[in-house]
Image (spheres, rainbow, N blue to C red):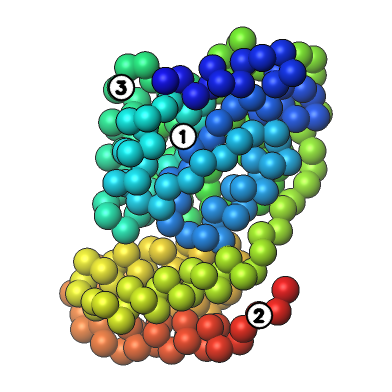
């Protein structure tokens, strides 16, 4: 089933104010904070959002329907989003727009090399950047009628979603501190920390990643991460 066909009726056609109306966007993202940002961006743009938090869940979605747009985080708990991009761009019928996303500076080249149509660097908070990344790659028959005045608006996700991400990291660290999981924690926390502007957490994530890449002992770095995460959980942010 082509999910975009579900919204082909005239009253679901895109408009200049809601240029993504009629589109279904499948977001593959394990961060609750990043996904909340995507939800707000889709809401402001008129698009319907569906979410998967890992490769396994994403593949289940894609077996049932074909979204209009696929946005894939490159660092996922059960593998690399690059693999999913490669699978999707070679499938028939192809998803109209496939975008990679990451907080890692190397993500852009990796996503495009895998065949993605474009890349969104985290944090993704600009409504204009989000809409333009999709609109410029849509087929002509899915474009809104008339000129689109891209809004100069920045969205602000609920910080309770950040708390959910901290709880997720704490759970991962409690289950395993093997190198594979610590690599995942480092990339996950790095993206989340940069998105919320948490420099201390971002520096700790970078330190852990560097220790892992050079083969140095990671006990102190992992302990620092665990302590910072627990501090943020204890803050119990009131929004």
On screen, residue 117 above or below 188: above
* Residue visible at 46% across and 75% down in the picture: 167
Across and down, in percent, residue 219 comes to 26, 87
- Looking at marks 1 and 3 on the same chain, the residue that comes earlier in the sequence is marked by 1
The answer to which quarter of the image holds residue 138 is top right
Residue 197 seen from this side = no
How many marks can you see? 3
Judged left or right of residue 115, residue 11 is: right
Residue 218 in percent (x, y) is at: 26, 82
Identify the secondary structure beneath mark 2: loop
Q: Which residue is mark 1?
A: 70
**Between marks 1 and 3, how big is the CA–CA gap?**
13 Å
The answer, for residue 158, to whether it is visible in the render is yes
Foreground of the two, 54 or 152: 54
Label 3: how many residues lie within 10 Å, few (<14), some (14-19) or many (20+)? Answer: few
Judging by the rendered image, the residue that carries numbered circle 3 is 91
Q: Between 9 and 178, which is closer to the camera in this rendering?
A: 9
Q: Is residue 66 above or below residue 111?
A: above
Which of marks 1 and 2 precedes in the sequence? Answer: 1
User: Could you give the CA–CA distance between mark 2 and mark 3, rounded to whole angstroms?
Assistant: 43 Å
């Amino acid at each position: 089933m082509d999910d975009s066909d579900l919204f082909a009726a005239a009253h679901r056609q895109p408009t200049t104010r809601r240029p993504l109306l009629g589109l279904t966007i499948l977001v593959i993202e394990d961060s609750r904070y990043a996904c909340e940002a995507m939800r707000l961006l889709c809401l402001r743009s008129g698009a319907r959002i569906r979410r998967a938090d890992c490769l396994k869940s994403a593949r289940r979605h894609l077996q049932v329907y074909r979204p209009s747009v696929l946005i894939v985080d490159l660092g996922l708990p059960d593998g690399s989003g690059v693999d999913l991009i490669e699978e999707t761009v070679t499938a028939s019928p192809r998803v109209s727009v496939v975008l990679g996303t990451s907080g890692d500076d190397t993500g852009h080249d990796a996503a495009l090399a895998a065949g993605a149509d474009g890349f969104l660097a985290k944090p993704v908070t600009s409504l204009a950047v989000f809409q333009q990344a999709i609109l410029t790659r849509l087929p002509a028959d899915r474009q809104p009628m008339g000129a689109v005045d891209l809004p100069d608006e920045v969205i602000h996700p609920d910080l309770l979603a950040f708390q959910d991400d901290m709880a997720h990291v704490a759970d991962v660290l409690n289950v395993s501190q093997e190198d594979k999981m610590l690599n995942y924690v480092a990339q996950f926390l790095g993206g989340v920390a940069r998105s919320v502007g948490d420099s201390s957490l971002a520096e700790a994530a970078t330190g852990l990643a560097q220790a892992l890449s050079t083969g140095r002992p990671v006990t102190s770095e992992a302990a620092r991460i665990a302590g910072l995460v627990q501090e943020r959980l204890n803050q119990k942010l009131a929004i």
